[in-house]
Each structure stands twice: as structure tokens, then as C-alpha cells.
Image (cartoon, helix red, strand yellow):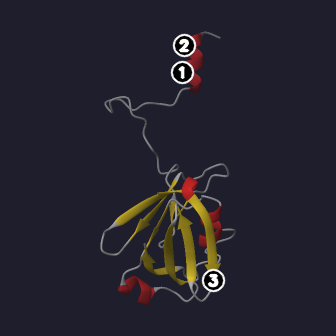
Amino acid sequence: MSDSSVLQRYAPKIAAGLGGQSVVTEIDAPDDLGAFGWLRGVKDFSRMLELRRKDGSILAVGYGYLDHAEFNPSEGITLSVAGRKIRIKGRNLNAEVRPTVRLFEGITRHRVPWIQEADRAVGIAAEERDTVIDVIEW
């Protein structure tokens, strides 16, 4: 087998006209579960957690700086990231959204690339078992 055939067979396909950038397909994109994203591949993990507020402000924190995470059903999720406390308040924060998918467990396993606050209309329209994030404080 020649070197060129090995490259053609195993190198990622590059779309023409994209300046050498590979295309991210929908297969690679995280699942959008409304309140949070989920990486579905067995070996997939996120390097950062993006926190999105209703007002459009976003904070991204590195999972490598996550000292500890705590879930209390009455208080929500508290993350300690590089000495900074981040509080996530809402409902069903550790409920099973689908088989083996839970927000808190996903954070502890670095499977959640983003979470977002729900606006009032989404919070009201959500079903009783849906995960809804009311407030993210940092």
C-alpha cells in the first residue's frame, strides 16, 4: 500500500473551498436537550463548560479547573471553579432526561458542553419532568 493511499483512506475529508478546515457534521454536534447540551460518544468529553444566561452573557470555564461539584435537590448545583462559586438553580437538575442522561452526572463526567437559563415562557411550558434552569449565578 502506498503512502498516498493510506492518507486518502485515513485522513479526514476536507471540503473544497474551506481553506483547509474540516467540516463539523451534525453527527459530531452535541445533542441539544433544551437546558443543556450532551456529548453522546462514549469517549467524547468537553474541555470547557459554557454557561449561558437569558440576557445573552456567557461564561466559559475549563473543566480542568473544576475543584468540586455539589448537588442539593433544594438548592441546585454548586460548582467550585478556580476558587469561584457558580450556582445553578432550577428543577429536575439531576433527573433522567433520557436513559443514562442526567445534567449533574454529565457535568461530573465532562459530557455537558453548555447549559442555559430558560426564559419565562420556556419555564412555564416545560413538562413536569423536564430539566429547567431558572438562574445561573457567578
Q: Secondary structure at mark 1?
A: helix
Q: Give the quadrant of the N terminus.
A: top right
Q: Nearer the viewer, mark 3 or mark 2?
A: 3
Q: Secondary structure at mark 3?
A: strand
Place residue 22 in its image quadrant: top left
Tell me the distance, in whole angstroms, between the alpha carbons under discs 3 and 2.
56 Å
Q: Nearer the viewer, residue 114 or 25?
A: 114
Mark 3 burial class by Cα count in 10 Å: few <14, some 14-19, many 20+ = few
Place residue 122 in its image quadrant: bottom left
Q: Which sits earlier in the primary sequence, circle 3 or circle 1?
A: 1
Q: Nearer the viewer, residue 133 or 101?
A: 133
| Residue in the image at 55% along x and 81% along y | 130
Place residue 136 in its image quadrant: bottom left
Q: Which sits earlier in the primary sequence, circle 3 or circle 2?
A: 2
Amino acid type, callout 2 = Ser
- Residue 98 position, x and y percent, is 64, 72
Q: Give the quadrant of the C terminus.
A: bottom left
Q: Using residue 99 as the reference point, say whether residue 113 is left or right of it.
A: left
Q: Using residue 53 as the reference point, say whether residue 103 is left or right of it.
A: right
Tell me the distance, in whole angstroms, between the alpha carbons under discs 3 and 1.
51 Å
Q: Is residue 102 visible?
A: no
Give the residue at mark 2: 4
Residues at discs 2 and 1 in contact (Cβ within 8 Å) = yes
Give the residue at mark 1: 8
Amino acid type, callout 3 = Asn
Q: Which mark is residue 72?
A: 3
| Residue in the image at 39% along x and 32% along y | 15
Q: Secondary structure at mark 2?
A: helix
Examine the rendered structure and indicate whether residue 130 appears above or below residue 60: below
